[in-house]
Image: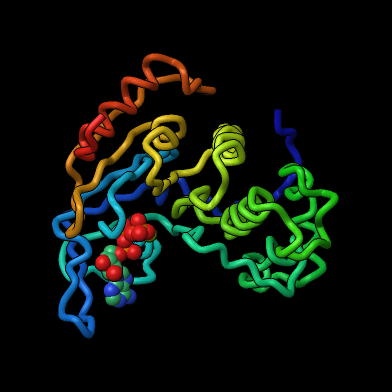
């Protein structure tokens, strides 16, 4: 189990603890013409709900998260969401900073001094099993460790909504399963409203309260699957296997 301490992040405002994406469209002008990423995309997340989003490559999942985080604006439709922190698809740890300074970057961005930011981040690193790696640079961390630092940076941004973009996609299968268990435990003790983008339907069912299945580009929701299972979940649980099959079918993947 994960023990108590850390004080940050707080700025969590229950009134803004939800996501409502309503019939959103977003396209891009490119050298090869217009690319419509999203068309009529809707998605809701209730306070402290974990919504897993699965969809084929290029269907607009990353675009959706950037819209939720207000890094982009929709061409049409509406988005209402609490302040949201993005864990980007590509790990954006700065190679010249130690693990603790990378994790503390979100605090520094909020105007907190380096010394104070480190003192806030340190107990979290310990809690995330990274105490011994505080002063290690990203290149010397394992993939799973880098993702934990990256997640911590997102968490320390202190936002009530977390937008996680394929956080474990680059990891080997065993590490990925370990990290899924880890994230599930973290969210049990640090509940947030989470939009978790993944291409792994098993991951979606293991972690989500609900799975939103998207169409190929231009992306929109084709199916929503409730996951009425307690945690921790077992991959081999017939209910998990069944929900995974349903998500695969909705994706149009032949068994
Ligand atoms: N800034 C941009 N300029 C031009 N085209 C873009 C831009 N951002 C996204 N696109 C295009 O929009 C579509 C959706 O991209 P997006 O990255 O949101 O998909 P995705 O579902 O996250 O894909 P993946 O599963 O590969 O991560 C793609 O065709 C992509 O090339
Ligand atoms: Mg993406």
Tell me where residue 239 appears, x and y as whole percent. 37, 16
| Residue at x 42%, y 46% (from the top left corner) | 196
So how many labels did they put on this image? 0
| Residue at x 82%, y 49% (from the top left corner) | 131
- Res 65 quadrant in image: bottom left
- Asked if residue 216 lies left or right of residue 16, the reply is left
Along the line of sight, which residue is nearer the eye, 67 or 135?
135
- Asked if residue 67 lies left or right of residue 144, the reply is left
Q: On the rendering, which quadrant does ligand 1 occupy?
A: bottom left
Image quarter of the N terminus: top right
Along the line of sight, which residue is nearer the eye, 29 or 14?
29
| Residue at x 50%, y 43% (from the top left corner) | 192
Image quarter of the C terminus: top left
| As drawn, 13 above or below 66 | above
Q: Residue furthest top?
A: 238
| As drawn, 188 above or below 5 | above
Tell me where residue 120 appears, x and y as whole percent. 75, 56
Tell me where residue 67 appears, x and y as whole percent. 33, 64
Asked whether the viewer can see residue 105, the reply is yes
Q: Residue furthest front?
A: 255
Asked whether the viewer can see residue 187, the reply is no
Along the line of sight, which residue is nearer the eye, 254 or 86?
254
Q: Residue furthest bottom?
A: 31
Q: Check the image and tell me how it is coloured.
A: rainbow
| Residue at x 34%, y 45% (from the top left corner) | 53
Tell me where residue 194 appears, x and y as whole percent. 44, 45
- Asked if residue 186 lies left or right of residue 14, the reply is right
């Amino acid at each position: 189990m994960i023990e108590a301490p850390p004080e940050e992040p707080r700025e969590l405002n229950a009134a803004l603890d939800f996501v409502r994406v309503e019939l959103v469209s977003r396209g891009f002008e490119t050298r090869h013409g217009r690319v419509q990423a999203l068309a009529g995309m809707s998605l809701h997340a209730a306070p402290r709900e974990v919504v897993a989003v699965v969809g084929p490559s290029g269907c607009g999942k990353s675009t959706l998260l950037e819209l939720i985080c207000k890094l982009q604006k929709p061409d049409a439709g509406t988005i209402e969401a609490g302040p949201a922190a993005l864990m980007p698809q590509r790990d954006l740890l700065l190679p010249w900073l130690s693990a603790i300074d990378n994790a503390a970057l979100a605090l520094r961005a909020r105007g907190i001094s380096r010394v104070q930011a480190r003192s806030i981040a340190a107990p979290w690193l310990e809690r995330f099993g990274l105490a011994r790696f505080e002063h290690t640079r990203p290149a010397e961390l394992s993939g799973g460790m880098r993702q934990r630092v990256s997640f911590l940076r997102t968490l320390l941004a202190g936002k009530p909504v977390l937008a996680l973009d394929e956080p474990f996609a680059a990891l080997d299968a065993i590490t990925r399963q370990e990290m899924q268990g880890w994230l599930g435990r973290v969210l049990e003790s640090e509940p947030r409203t989470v939009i978790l983008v993944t291409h792994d339907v098993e991951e979606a069912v293991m972690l989500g309260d609900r799975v939103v299945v998207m169409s190929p580009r231009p992306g929109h929701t084709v199916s929503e699957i409730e996951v009425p299972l307690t945690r921790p979940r077992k991959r081999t649980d017939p209910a998990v296997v069944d929900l995974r099959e349903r998500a695969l079918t909705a994706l149009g993947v032949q068994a």
